[in-house]
Amino acid sequence: MATEVGPEAQADELTRRRFLGVVAAPVLTVAIGGPLLKPSSAGAAIPSPPQLADTYDLGDLYSTSCKPTEDMLVLELGEDGVARLQLPRMEVGQGITTALAMVVAEEMELPLAQVEVLLSDARPELVWNQLTGGSTTIRSTYLPVRRAAAVARERLRQAASLRFNVSLADIELRAGVAYGPGGASATYASLTSAAAALSVAHTQVQMKPSSAFTLVGTPTNRVDARAIVTGQKQFTLDLDVPGALPTVVRRPPTLLGSPQAILNAAQVRAMPGVVDIALVPTGVAVAAETFGQALAAKDALQVTWNPGTIDGKSNEDIANALRAAMLPFAPALLVKTLDAEFDFAPVAHAPMETNTAVADVRPDRAEIWSGLKIPIVTLQNIAREAGLPQSRVVVHVIPSGGSFGRRLYHDGALEAARISKAMGRPVKLMWTRADDIRHGRVRGATHHKVRLTYALGQVLSYEHRMASTKTDWSHGFGEIITALAAAGPGNFGYAQTIFNMTVACPYNFGVVTELLNEPEAPLLSTSAWRSVYSPMVRGVEELLVDEMAALLRKDPLAFRRSVLKDAKQRAVLDAVASAGRWGRAMPAGHAQGLGFHQEYRSMTACLVELDGTDPNDPRVTKAVIAADVGRPINPRGLEGQLLGGLTDAISTVLKAGLHFDDGLPLESSYSDFRYARQSDSPIETELIVLPANRELPGGAGELGVAAAAGAVANAYARATGRKPRKFPINFDVDFEPAPR
Amino acid sequence: MPAFTFTVNGASVTVDAPADLAMLWVLRDKLGITGPKYGCGVGVCKACTCHLDGDAFTPCITPVSECAGRTVTTIEGLAAGDQLHPVQEAWLDVDVAQCGYCQPGQIMATVALLASNANPTDADIDAITNVCRCGTYVRIRQAIKRAAAAM
């Protein structure tokens, strides 16, 4: 594909290059400019020129920003023979520790069981190179990790050649053992000290050719699977930090309100187990001997509150503000148009582990433990808040129980630090589920206005305007300078840049225009949600592809094939159409639906079958998903991510959303925020991971959402004969909201 | 403060606690047994699912007083030493977990289901309402069927 010329050339250069020891990589300066479009094999479709995200996307930008520090990775081989990689990224369940352990094992010739991937504490010297998001981890670390592992491997080879007194060429490395001629052997463990003492300045190192891979690309189970199934995996609240007391916060009745005064502090302090109470900017904190006692005391608190940012506002007010921010289309003359408008309700991230942090802030130092995707900004903000130099703040990154974008923000860690400072003791902060759903960050509401023009059986233009509740990008690019630049008025510029670097139409639809607008108010507390703008922007686009096909009297599969831009895209689509038997006869009220998506230098297609017999209670019964990520590292982990994306799509298209009402969501738990359960999940599934077809891996963690969203919406439309325009589709307030 | 004695993972323990303290906090904050996770605190997400006398229960809404004199099993007590329970083995075989936070509860719910229903149908499996926000339901279903076959 023409758009992959840049990354491929880069891969060839980097994998073929010989280099000396650990060398600093040059800073790549990449000009933003599109390669010429290859002649389209789709024939008559009106070609669309590449969009920004086709030629240089967010992951490219992020990888470039990591270049100056990418070889500052720490990889250590212990005397126990275990290689330990300190990874400046965050494991949230997406499987990066397993994938990168495989990469280290492959490159070092070690058994996977002898590799550990640990999450680095915040390392401010890495600047931009400690951010987990945008499906960039594997893209930005694949080559640096391999280089580090290759250097380690060659040091071991050199140590073995000296020990056996033979040439380097006579050493064979296999499964953590160095073999010499005549049966000589030495384990890596026995060589590590000697290897450390070697001068490697002149060691010629080359990475293993991908054709020789035996582990990378092979389905592999998670490295932490046994710890998980035995209950041994530790999350933030499971850590035993001496003296850290269970702490919860009583929060205001409306979003982003603040406390005025506590009316019954003495009474609450006297409750069993209560140790301390503190007023903080976000509410009133209670520390107790157990969480149960802290929760009871929190509920007993009587507090007066200042208003928040959206008091009195509901979903309808938010939707009206978004519609008002939408500019009208110019009149379309002499052509037919397909016009549609769509609304998406706000959605909670709702990771299983709520916002949590342990904080120990003292007058002269601070130590934080939390699940953090941007720990450097966390450290810098907490240092500023606590009045400490950055060198006196340690931030430990703990694997979290999900994120889906939520842990880009460190509000939990900052709140815990404030409470610890106010109470003068270490605290273990837990947000309740209601806190997390009502006061947490959300994917904001969006409104979409879309027009396709067509004539003589061809799409001439595609225009998509999206108005979104402001998505907060104030976390910046991983450190405080860009975070401050993105806070305040700079945010919209950031939002537009991220939009343009992630969203692209994969079809030849003539003149393609996609625009984002973000009205300033109403102000929700937001954070990018898995796949950011794409589940909505591309989801409704897939829905309109089907509606366009119907207007042109074409089959949805045949129409997609005719307007997709290249053969690789069609191969992914064909894979699901074939395996899923597209077009097979379905019972009344049941239907198939298709979706396609391309992003992160990867692409995927999804075919679902849906039982819409009861339009108010549809069920996806089957799903077939194919993905081409260029080079899959762990196909089993990739399949898991695609299934996660499918479940997100089922949830947010069909039934999971938030009703803001008088300044706060009515939803407060999974009983009313209707994220999918087992009974919403397909019984039959087939996953197809296309084999490696280039050197570099594409992104995968967020890939699965948008195509599946399109497929589920299309299947629902075909099964029920309805045209979905508001999401989630079934979204009544049929529950009694919990008290505020 | 009253004292309550019960058996947890094969050992008899006595804790001083208010009678209405939820068992989840007795396990986690008083006994340091952290396999059962907080997910909602209102018995909905079932991330904390454990066994009380062999039946699945949600300790986040069960007062410690209800557990007195009874037998509690958490995820930590499921394996016999290094010998994993067949349900745990099935979870490993299928590589169910992503973040892993809900999986102790999913596994305990499955063990309880299989104890009363050796060959659950898809409808029986659909009746498990434990939330998995990573969306591992497809593999959970596969693992339940695999464990049922193995047992």
Image (cartoon, rainbow, N blue to C red):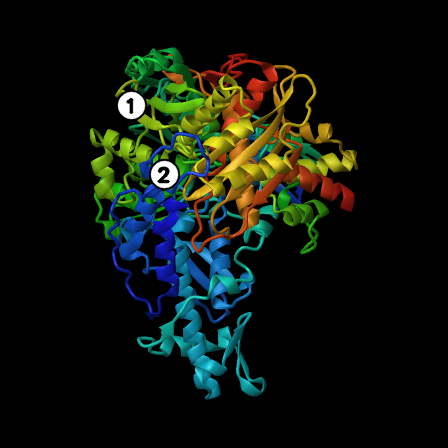
Q: Is residue A481 depicted above or below A517 in this figure?
A: below
Q: Quadrant of residue A598?
A: top left
Residue type of the residue flagged with mark 1 = Asn
In the rendered view, does B42 fall on the left or right side of A343?
A: right
Residue A198: where, in percent of width, then height? 36, 78
Residue plotted at (33% across, 36% down): A51
Residue plotted at (47% across, 24% down): A545
* SS under mark 2: helix
Q: Which residue is mark 2?
A: A408
Disc sitting over residue A517 in the figure: 1
Residue plotted at (33% across, 46% down): A60
Q: Earlier in the sequence, mark 2 or mark 1?
A: 2
Q: Quadrant of the C terminus of chain A?
A: top left
Callout 2: residue from which chain? A
Which of the two discs, 2 and 1, sits closer to the camera? 1
Residue A271: where, in percent of width, then height? 45, 27
Which sits in the foreground, A213 or B91? A213
* SS under mark 1: strand
Q: Quadrant of the N terminus of chain A?
A: top left
Callout 1: residue from which chain? A
Which sits in the foreground, B100 or A162? A162
* Residue A540 appears in the figure: yes
In the rendered view, does A679 fall on the left or right side of A135?
A: right
Residue B138: where, in percent of width, then height? 63, 36
Q: Is residue A104 depicted above or below B103 in this figure?
A: below
Residue type of the residue flagged with mark 2 = Leu
Q: Report how far apart the C-alphas of labels 2 and 1 lie in the structure.
A: 22 Å
